[in-house]
Amino acid sequence: MGKLDAVHTSNAALVQRQPLVAVFFGGTGGIGHVTLRALATAEVNNGGKGLRAYIVGRKAEAAKDFIAECRGIYPGGQFKFVQAKDLSLIREVDQVCADIRRMEEEEEGQDARIDYLMMGQGGSIFLPRIDTKEGIDRTMALMYYSRMRAIINLLPLLLRSTLPATVVSVYAAGAEAKLFPEDLSLRNPSHYSYSQARSHMVYMHTLFMETLAEQNRGKLALIHIFPGLVLGPGFQSPEYPTWFRVVWRWVFIPLFGRILTVPPNECGARMLSLASPRYPPLPVDGPKSEAGVAVGTDGRPGSGVYSLNWNAESNRNGKAYQKINKVEMRRKVWDHTMKAFEVIEAGGVFTE
Ligand SMILES: NC(=O)c1ccc[n+]([C@@H]2O[C@H](COP(=O)([O-])OP(=O)(O)OC[C@H]3O[C@@H](n4cnc5c(N)ncnc54)[C@H](OP(=O)(O)O)[C@@H]3O)[C@@H](O)[C@H]2O)c1
């Protein structure tokens, strides 16, 4: 999906195919925001069949303005805000997902479903380890655990998609480096740094998603994408360390900003194009080598989980997985993640 023309053609085909139901975690800002804007624009420009969109975020005022903008672009669409206090907490993710399920099931009945789920919550990077009251590092909670929890919670609606459903997690696909298999949570202080946490989250995305793809053959395409550098309000967040904000504003942007960034509208259109048949679920009878199908994380075309670069081409880091026993690590990551959810759901603090 390299060329932008192909992206727009694919998005036009998507909206003309059927009415869409889309959910955006982190939809009040950044990449979630520009992707929903691209979807509303594609609907109106191509005679789309209709849209119901759920916007999940913290800031009600930002959501109100954004919904007004979306209605201005596409008056025929339905845009609903679901407020989240803090998605670094798994129990808050549960609450938000229960709200979405209730709204969709009560209001839409037989038609309740999700066709496209995007997760981009939590923009700040390079933060030190801070555990949430549920016992997970806050950065890892926002960019890995909360996202896998949202997929699990919303699975009943995703499995009812008539497309089938596409799940997109926007973070750092392809950045696998060192892995501590016996310390997935990075509790040992000598193991923790932001880049080490990023490496773990990327491995865990791939391995957890591969299990999900296997369990939901023919139903669910799962994508982890590195979006490139997309400038947005997130980079001015007071959560960033001062050194980062100074270097960013006075050195990086003036020197490299224009040449190294992906324009937000282009990024939004590319993120939407991930719902194309180029990224299919793992077929019931195993991957087939069909023309025009992307290569999955296991190196086979159409294998249901995709690690992608900003231009939606595969950036799978095959070498990283040659060094580990993938079957065993898949099981380990699944057990670890589900155990965290189980402990927290029961009101406990996760300590493994
Ligand atoms: N933009 C880039 O250049 C870039 C590059 C590589 C990777 N990424 C990754 O891609 C993802 C999306 O990036 P982005 O640029 O769209 O980020 P962003 O502009 O900072 O947007 C983040 C979104 O997450 C929400 N959010 C943040 N913390 C939250 C919390 N504790 N609870 C609930 N919602 C929360 C924000 O909601 P509110 O507005 O309500 O606060 C906002 O909607 C991030 O994981 C980022 O690390 C981005």
Image: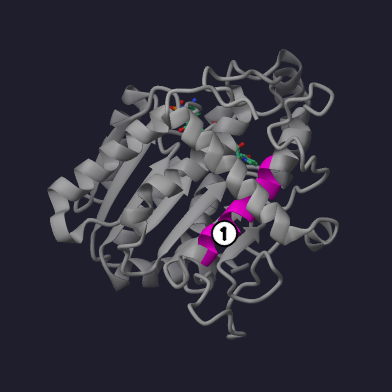
Q: Name the image quarter holding residue 2.
A: bottom right
Give the main secondary structure of the magenta stretch.
helix
Residue at (42%, 31%) from the top-left corner?
345
Front residue of 192/315: it is 192
Q: Magenta span covers which residues? A: 201-214
Quarter of the rendering occupied by the C terminus: top right
Residue 204 located within the stretch drawn in magenta? yes
Name the residue that disc number 1 marks: 211
Residue at (59%, 60%) from the top-left corner?
210
Considering only vertical position in the picture, is 245 above or below 178?
above
Residue 241 located within the stretch drawn in magenta? no
Element marked by disc 1: helix
* Image position, residue 125 (x, y; %): 67, 29
Residue at (33%, 31%) from the top-left corner?
95
Q: Is residue 221 left or right of residue 225?
A: left
* Image position, residue 138 (x, y; %): 59, 25
